[in-house]
Amino acid sequence: MKIKFWGVRGSIATPGSNTVKYGGNTTCIEIRTDANDLIILDAGTGIHALAQDLLKEMPVKAHIFITHTHWDHIQGLPFFIPIFIPNNHITIYGGIDPVTNETINRALSVQLQYSFFPIREAQLNARIEYVTVTPGVPVKVGSATITPIVLSHPVLNFGYRIDCDGQSVFFTGDYEPQLNIYDPQDDEFAEFQSFVDAKWDEVVLAIKDVDALIVDSSYTTQEYASKQGWGHGTYDSGIKLATAANAKKLFFTHHEPTRSDAHLDEIYQDLLRNNAEVGCELLLAQEGVDISL
Amino acid sequence: MPNSKNETLIVLVEKMPAFPKSVQQVMELTSDLNASAKDIVRVIECDPIMTVKILKAINSSFYGLPQKITSVQRAVVHIGINTIKNIALGVAAMGMLNADNKADFNTSKFLLHSLTTAAISKMLAERIGLSAMVSGDCFVAGLLHDFGKVVFAEFMPDEFKLALEKSKEQQLPLHQTELEFIGLNHSQAGKMLAEKWELSELLIDAIAHHHNPGLNQNILRDCVFAANQISKYMQFGDGGNPLIEEFPEAIISRFGLPFPAICEALGDLEPVKSEAQSFINL
């Protein structure tokens, strides 16, 4: 299995001289099975550069798994050039939003409206299919099995585990491990904590023994103090998750948009220094680097 | 009642608004970026319509839960407070349940009956040493046990009015007169809706059989049965049924006391009423 990050930034694309090293595009991850089947995790602005790369291998058969429908994870969909070219076959996977009851096709159709985009959905030339996925129910793509799990975020968000050719990777999408909403003196605290612990165990089990865990680590622990409930994890919560799940490599992604390359380097050095005993390899997600597991 | 009528009822209930105080509070809390999650959960937990809509969403087969979720708190852990908040906001946007309906069924008194039954059901569960989780489920079962009545008041007011009147005048159980005038009673209507919404088996059973306590082993239903009688005995609100049902042997042995000795054993229940009242009065 091969992995390549095309977008590693959270919230909004951040081009400029401060983000040259790690990249300024929003989330998009390319995964290739040994048989070269193409799985794409999320369609942030990074998918545009991936699309340019794919023009060399038309016709394209792509399986795009959307973790959630926040803008930074779907904004690149209308710019995924293969959707305009005949004979390409694009399948877009996602969940049903419990608030709107809408399926994942809305992520594209809502953008392809007269006021927002010059091309209508009916004018797309590729064959486009939408698949609703259910947590815990695996989906097959070639030799790969993709299994979604619901992870806490302000909108329905799936983490995806991909098992293929004897290797495995898990991507959290955007994820803030659930906190107890009660105070320790509240009657409800202990019961709620037992639900939180049960969910944590379920998440750890879903990630168990992966070769690579790609985790939302938007904040430092210090920054997180004022950002609880915003739906994102920290470097430390990522390490805690990777350790509990026995992941071999841990990629930190969803870099906070104001974070410069220099600051990321500094954070990374601190992480290495403070976690020398940790059992997995710590890495910052970086656009354009080929990763073989 | 023919199935097509049941189908119509299911569609109507989808658009059914929640109780005024919770609608108002959800509107307020969802407009405040700093509102605490536990305050929002508390409001939802005290409104049968909000609760049922959250449970319906979370238990949908699209979320593939290995076990059904019976409490709003667990729904929060599973899908996140913001999604729960937005479902509640969607319910609030449907308006408020009208206090005046053609059935002359007082929805505030109904809510007080439901809420006190819920709270007493939880107290009974705790008293016999059930876990916090099961006790919480007993609260939900108490809150939802009479759900069918408010559906009747809203969508079949003429028939329900006749059932209420006959029950009161002739001191007959309301579920009996409902059968006569509507063709199904509130337990059966509640069961049909709960099944449609894929709620947990135990919850469906507690709603379906809260007037038949000896039928099978279901601790939720037993707690609701007992709490229902206690709430009526204490005259907390009014669910429209004038009759207090006797405790069968199985219920006496379950709680270790006959009726009404069990009420005294629970201590002063007035705070249960006043707390419930605070979730009702605008």
Image (cartoon, rainbow, N blue to C red):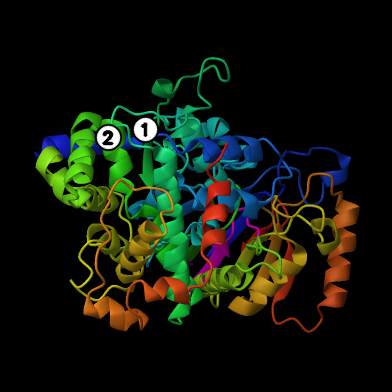
Up/down of B126 relative to A256, above or below? below
Q: Residue at x 42, y 31 (%)?
A: B99
Q: Residue at x 38, y 37 (%)?
A: B106
Of A32 and A56, nearer the camera is A32
Look at the numbered disc 1 and give the secondary structure of its residue.
loop
The image position of residue B223, as x and y in percent, is: 36, 69
Question: Is residue A141 visible from the viewing direction of this image?
Answer: no
Q: Amino acid at mark 1?
A: Lys
Q: Chain of mark 2?
A: B
Query: In which quadrant will I find the N terminus of chain B?
Result: top left
Identify the image quadrant of residue A252: bottom right
Up/down of A111 relative to A90, above or below? above
Up/down of B60 relative to A72, above or below? below
- Asked whether, in this view, residue A94 is left or right of residue B226, the answer is right
Question: Is residue B252 visible from the viewing direction of this image?
Answer: yes
For label 2, the residue is: B11
The image position of residue B152, as x and y in percent, is: 26, 38
Is residue B34 within the magenta segment? no
Q: Amino acid at mark 2?
A: Val
For label 1, the residue is: B15
Label ID, residue A214: none
Look at the numbered disc 2 and give the secondary structure of its residue.
helix
Labels 2 & 1 near each other (Cβ < 8 A)? yes
Query: In which quadrant will I find the C terminus of chain B?
Result: top right
Identify the image quadrant of residue B268: bottom right
Count neighbours of disc 1 (C-alpha within 10 A) and say few if under 14, some if 14 to 19, many if 20 or more.
few
Q: Which residues are magenta?
A: A163-176
- Asked whether, in this view, residue A179 is left or right of residue A38, the answer is right
